[in-house]
Amino acid sequence: DKLRSVAGRNKPRRGACGMAKPNFSGVYSLKSSENEDAFLQAQGVGWVLRKAAKAVGSKRVVVEHVDDILKIKAGLVDLEYEIGGEAIPTRFMGFEFTDGCDWHSDGVSLCQTKNLIIDGDLRLKKRDSKCNRL
């Protein structure tokens, strides 16, 4: 199911300082991710596969942003967030996660957070916040 363009459909949003919040619809490549190696290691991903994942480089990410809803398609993963809403529980490869998305403190950029949950306890947090528009 392909994401469709939503240019021009958003209502203007204002940040805490009255600045207009941007529309993030578009295609991006992930530039960096906080704690990614440790996050993969905690899931049992071996050294060779972790290094291969890093060597592959940027990942293509398609984003559809309408009002406070953010739909993200990255490879085999399709996620939908309410910006600033409740974290979404997900499962992948037998592991439990919570995914969330919120505005950075600057009020005009977004950050996706993924938490690894093992036996009901938060074990590791990963943040994807730096992307380049393609």
Image (cartoon, grey):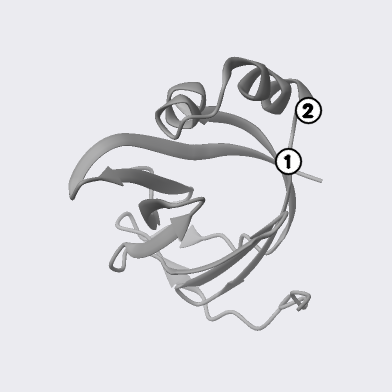
**Circle number at residue 126:** none
Q: Residues within 10 Å of mark 1 (few under 14, many from 20)?
A: some
Residue at image mark 2: 56
Q: Secondary structure at mark 1?
A: loop
Residue 16 percent coordinates (x, y): 30, 57
The reply to whether callout 2 and callout 1 are in contact (CB within 8 Å) is yes
Quote the CA–CA distance across marks 2 and 1.
8 Å
Residue 48 percent coordinates (x, y): 66, 17
Residue 97 percent coordinates (x, y): 37, 52
* Residue found 45% across the figure and 49% down from its top: 112
Q: Residues within 10 Å of mark 2 (few under 14, many from 20)?
A: few
Q: Secondary structure at mark 2?
A: helix
Asked whether 130 or 50 is in front, the reply is 50
> Which residue ends up furthest to the right in the rendered image?
134
**Circle number at residue 59:** 1
- The quarter of the picture where residue 77 lies is bottom right
